[in-house]
Amino acid sequence: MDPESPNRNLAPITAELDPQGRLQVGGCVLSELAQRYGTPLYVLDEQSLRQACRAYKKALEQHYPGPSLALYASKANSSLAITALVAAEGLGLDAVSAGELLTALEGGMPMERIVLHGNNKSAEELSLALQNGVTVVVDNWRDIELLQELAEGRSETVPLLLRFTPGIECHTHEYIRTGHLDSKFGFDPDQLEQVLTHLAGCSWAQLKGLHAHIGSQIFELDPHRDLAGVLADAFVLARSLGHNPTDLNVGGGLGIRYVASDDPPSIDAWVKVVAEAMAAACQARNLELPRLLCEPGRSLVAAAGVTLYEVGSRKHIPGLNTYVAVDGGMSDNPRPITYQSEYTACLADSPGAAASESVTLVGKHCESGDVLLKGLPLPATKAGEVLVVLATGAYNASMASNYNRIPRPATVMVGSGRSELVQRRERPDELLRYDVLPERLRSVG
C-alpha cells in the first residue's frame, strides 16, 4: 500500500501495491484471491500475526523483571491454524467453551499454557478441562460446586485462577466493559475473603493465581496502572489465607486502530505500563514477583485480517443517500450492527483512487440495519469489483452467523506469495445438516 495512504497504518504490515497498483497482502493480490476462493473471504496475514505475538513476548521480557506469559484470547478468532501459529510463537491461550478448548488442544497448544474462562461453564466443559490438565478460571460459586463434584476421587489437584471484578471503569462500549462492579463476570471484591477461605479448605483445589479484566478496545493506560494495585492486594490476601499463588492475570483489552482517528497505545507501551505498575505494586507490598499473565486477543489478530467482498447493486436517492451493496454483511461482520463499530475500506484494484462519492455500504441480508459503513468515500464503483474492509481479523469470523441461511465465508492465510485455505467455505446444503423433519410433516398438500 502507498506509504502516504491514510490507510497505511490500518492494513496488515505486508500490504503494498503491485506494479499494476492493485492491493496485495502477504505477496498475494487480493482481487486474485477473491477470484480463486470466492467472496466474502477472510484473509489473514501470517507475518502480521507473528509479529504481534513477538511484540508481546519481547515487551514482557524487556519491561517485566519476573516470569511472564501472554495468552491468546481465542474468542477473537478461533481456528486450528491460528492456534498452531500462536503456540509456535510461544504464547498460551484462553478458551471460553468446549469448542475453543478442543480447538486449542487439537491445534497443538500445550495444556499447561491453556486457561478456561466462562461465567456459566457446563459440567462437560469443566470435565474436559480437568481431563486435559487445563487451568480453570473460577468465576462464581457454581464453578466451585461443579468442580467439587468432578474432582471427587481424583488424585490430582485442579489448577485454578480466581476471577474477581476490580471495580475499575474505562471508556469503552458498554457491552465490552467488564471491569466495573455491575458485571456478569467474576466474584465481587467483597466476596474475595470468603471464597479464598473456602478454597483453602478444598483439598482438590490448587489456587495458582488471581485474574481481573477491565474491558476491551481500551486506549487508556491509567486503568491498567490502577489494576496492578488491586491485584497485588488480592495476592496478599490470598497468601494470608493459606494459599501460595504464583500468577497474576491482568486480562487484555488493548484497543486497535479501526479508522484513521483511532489512537491506541502500541503493544510495547501497553505492556510497559502494565509490567512496571505490577512490579511497583508488588515491591511496595514486599512480594516476590509473580508470573505476569495477560490475555491479548484483538490486538494480536485484528490488524492481520481483511475481508473481501464483491460489489453488487446500488441505489441512489437524490439528495439523501447512495447505497452500495456487497455480497456479505451482518452475518460475516455483526460488529457494526451490534456495537456501532466503524471500519475503513477501499477497492482492491484501485486503493489509492480519489473518492468521487460518499456511500453507505450495506450487506445483502433482509435487515434495514445491515449496514457495514456509513459515509464511506469511494471512487465510482461498478458491480463485480472487489472491496476490501480492513482490520477484520478479530470478532468477525468468530461472531459470524448463518442469518438468512447464508453460509459463512472461507478463510485463507497468506505469506511469502502463497495462500493456504485454513477454513473452508460453508455450502448452502450444509446448513440443513442439523435439521430434522418429522415424518408426519413430509406429506405434501
Image (cartoon, helix red, strand yellow):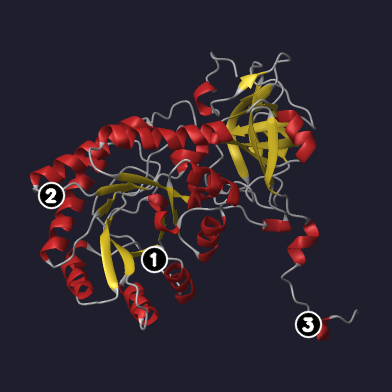
- Horizontal and vertical percent position of residue 218: 36, 40
| Residue neighbourhood size for the residue with mark 3, other residues' Cα within 10 Å, grouped as few (<14), some (14–19), many (≥20) | few
Tell me which corner region of the image, top left, top right, bottom left or bottom right, holds residue 390. top right
Residue 119, numbered label? 1
Q: Which residue occupies 30% across, 53% down?
A: 179
- Horizontal and vertical percent position of residue 444: 90, 79
Q: What's the amino acid at mark 2? A: Leu
Q: Are marks 3 and 2 in contact (CB under 8 Å)?
A: no
- Whether 134 is drawn above or below 399: the answer is below
- Whether 262 is drawn above or below 367: the answer is above
Q: Is residue 114 visible?
A: yes
- Whether 167 is drawn above or below 49: the answer is below
- Which residue is label 2 attached to? 287
Q: Are marks 1 and 2 in contact (CB under 8 Å)?
A: no
Q: Identify the mark nearer the N-term, 3 or 1.
A: 1
Viewer-nearest of discs 3 and 2: 2
- Which residue is label 3 attached to? 438
Tell me which corner region of the image, top left, top right, bottom left or bottom right, holds residue 102. bottom right
Question: Which of 117 and 260 lies nearest the eye of the viewer?
Answer: 117
Q: Identify the mark nearer the N-term, 3 or 2.
A: 2
Viewer-nearest of discs 1 and 2: 2
Question: Which of 111 and 424 lies nearest the eye of the viewer?
Answer: 111
- Between marks 1 and 2, how big is the CA–CA gap? 30 Å
| Residue neighbourhood size for the residue with mark 1, other residues' Cα within 10 Å, grouped as few (<14), some (14–19), many (≥20) | some
Side (left or right) of 82 relative to 235? right
Q: Identify the mark nearer the N-term, 1 or 2.
A: 1
Q: What's the amino acid at mark 1? A: Asn
User: Please, what secondary structure does the residue beneath circle 1 have?
Assistant: loop
- Horizontal and vertical percent position of residue 252: 36, 46
- Between marks 3 and 1, how big is the CA–CA gap? 36 Å
